[in-house]
Image (cartoon, grey):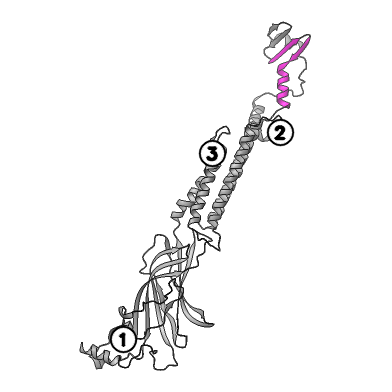
Amino acid sequence: MNDVRLLKNDLFHNYDRQILPIVDMNTPVNVSIYFQLLSVYELDLKNQLLSTSAAFKISWRDELMIWNTANYSGLDRLTVTLASIWKPDVIILNSESTKKTLTDKDDDNHFVTVNYDGFIEWWIYVNLQTHCKVNMTNYPFETQKCDINVTKSYLDDESEILQSVNDSSSIENLVTNGEWEVFPLRSSEQIFHRSNREISGLKWTIEMKRETEFYIWNFLMPSISLSVADWFSFWLPTKSAEKLTLSIFVFLANAVLIRLFNDSMPTISDDISKFGRLLWITLLLSGLVILVNVIITSLFYCKSPKCIFTCCNCCTDCCKCKCFTKCCKKCTEPPRDTDRKPFESLRNGAERNQESALITHRDVSITIKEGIDQTFIHHRGMKIQLGTITSYYEENNKRTDWSDVSRNIDFFASLVIFALYTTLYIVHIFILDLY
């Protein structure tokens, strides 16, 4: 105990902590810094602030604190308060706080270890809140890079030089964060500008990748589910009121999803989120689905006698599988004489062999002949063959109703919307690296 008291009296006699601890004033003090990240609390995207807990080990050599261990019973180290010795000029340049120093004004609460050769180690544990320029392009499936910049406040490079030791950053004791996956830190020397002068410093880069599972199940999967429901609205019957109700519900749900997404975004952002763009495109497509469903419903109830384009006949046949039905009939039925005229008289031999039924009412008589599927009406000497006339008009004067047109639009719109939604999600899954 007497040796410790004697050593302190000898070391601090005429010691001035405001003077650089070197013998040759023409040489700078080399200060080594070791940075260890302990935890990542939060990355505030709106205010662009990173909250972390870290440990700094700052070491330097004080040439005025050297002694011979033989003179003090082999005492080779001494613990003193930081307020009693010279302290390196170290600040966190991008700290959110106006006080950017590592310690408070009162340094009596901090202790350092002084070795007999003047080598001093100072461990300090701090909670940092630093500015971080976030990149919102791939939000919320992004990788963010935040820097911690360390430099000097009043000393220049001629008086003090900051340098990082080998393997100057570590995440071995890092407490895992449920939102971010932290990669190994990288340190580098950096030049900062102060009062038109260049000041050297150090920069540690914290690279973090956001855990995507939460956002996949709370944003991406609901968006895909709404898109599927939007597509299924084309398969509901046009007479059903739920057809238009479902598409309106999907539109409003997409609007709410965009509102929730925008609440987590910074108010001012230089970058446009690709996932946010995806949500806006799905909102526009759901609005387009509403418009198409309104047109389909209006056409279905349209009673206008105006002609419909003849191309709708082919579309109607495709939608109702009439083309396939016609092909089957051609294979199963015997060929017919298509050149037969509707009013061509039957042969006398065939006419005699067929049984017939006669219905008479006043001056109108109806003759029905079995076996050849023909019906005749006799009126005042005129003979009209109804069966042949009906088949003639069925083959040559097909008519497409507005309801058929609405069904055509329903079918082809479902194909187009399905292709648009599928392409949209596949492209953005590859852009956001979610595969």
The residue indicated by pointer 1 is 115
Residue in view at x 45 percent, y 57 percent: 212
Circle 2 sits in a helix, a strand or a loop, which is it? loop
Q: Secondary structure at mark 1?
A: strand
Q: Is residue 320 left or right of residue 56?
A: right
Q: Is residue 395 magenta?
A: yes
Q: CA distance from mark 3 to mark 1?
A: 80 Å
Q: Is residue 323 visible?
A: no
For label 1, the crowd category at 10 Å Cα-Cα, with few meaning under 14, some 14 to 19 and many 20 or more, is: many
Question: Looking at the picture, how far across and down is residue 299, in whole percent?
Answer: 64, 34
Range drawn in magenta = 373-397
Q: Residue furthest left?
A: 1
Give the side of residue 178 with respect to residue 355, left or right. Answer: left
Q: CA distance from mark 3 to mark 2?
A: 28 Å
Query: Which corner quadrant holds the N terminus?
Result: bottom left
User: On screen, 365 above or below 280?
Assistant: above
Q: Name the secondary structure under disc 3.
A: helix
Seen from the viewer's position, the closer of residues 61 and 378 is: 61
Q: Depth-wise, is mark 3 or mark 1 nearer the camera?
A: 3
> Whole-Å distance between the Cαs marked 1 and 2?
99 Å
Disc 1 marks a residue whose amino acid type is Asn
| Residue 77 location (% of width, % of height) | 28, 85
Identify the residue at horizontal 42%, vertical 62% (top origin): 180
Residue 245: give its label. Answer: 3
Q: Is residue 412 visible?
A: yes
Q: Position of residue 339 (x, y in %)?
A: 77, 23
Mark 2 = which residue? Answer: 308
